[in-house]
Amino acid sequence: MSHVRVPSDAIDTHGLDERAATLACLAALVALRASPSSYRVCVDRALAAGASVDDVIAMLKVIAPSVGLARVVAAAPGLALALGYDIDSALETLDMPGRL
């Protein structure tokens, strides 16, 4: 996993709206196998710019053919944590008796 530094100041959007630019930044981080902490910074910016969880998922679907499904699957847990999804809690819920 590479450590990619996401600058703390606003990214130069080069004519893209902030939402599109932050989703593109996130796509680049996935392609580079960035650390989960890098995902968090970029996800926070994307959500602040109006992106939704569905937009992040759509971005993964769009880049999968280019970066490979294995890279997208590897990035998914880090992105889930950055989006505030508690993976451990979700897995524990699956293990509860009487639950289908």
Image (spheres, rainbow, N blue to C red):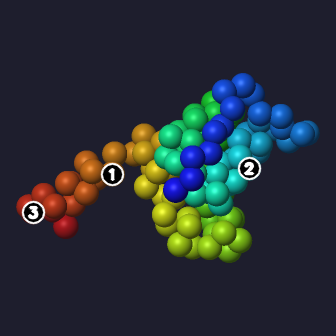
The foreground one among 70 and 93 is 70
Q: Which amino acid type is marked by label 3?
A: Gly
Q: Secondary structure at mark 2?
A: helix
Distance, label 2 to label 1, CA atoms, is 25 Å
Q: Disc 1 vs disc 3: Cβ atoms closer than 8 Å? A: no
Q: Which amino acid type is marked by label 1?
A: Ile
Which residue position holds label 3? 98
Is residue 91 left or right of 21 when viewed as pictured?
A: left
- Write the residue at 72% across / 25% down: 9
Distance, label 2 to label 3, CA atoms, is 42 Å
Q: Which amino acid type is marked by label 2?
A: Ala
Which residue position holds label 1? 87
- Write the residue at 75% across / 28% down: 10
Q: Secondary structure at mark 3?
A: loop
- Write the residue at 71% across / 71% down: 66
Whichever of labels 1 and 3 marks the residue nearer the N terminus, that label is 1
Q: Secondary structure at mark 1?
A: helix
Q: Quadrant of residue 20?
A: top right
Marking on residue 24:
2
Q: Quadrant of the C terminus?
A: bottom left
Distance, label 1 to label 3, CA atoms, is 20 Å
- Write the residue at 68% across / 65% down: 63
Residue 74, percent across and down?
A: 48, 63
Is residue 19 left or right of 91 when viewed as pictured?
A: right
The reply to whether residue 3 is visible in this rendering is yes
Whichever of labels 2 and 1 marks the residue nearer the N terminus, that label is 2
Marking on residue 26:
none
The foreground one among 2 and 82 is 2
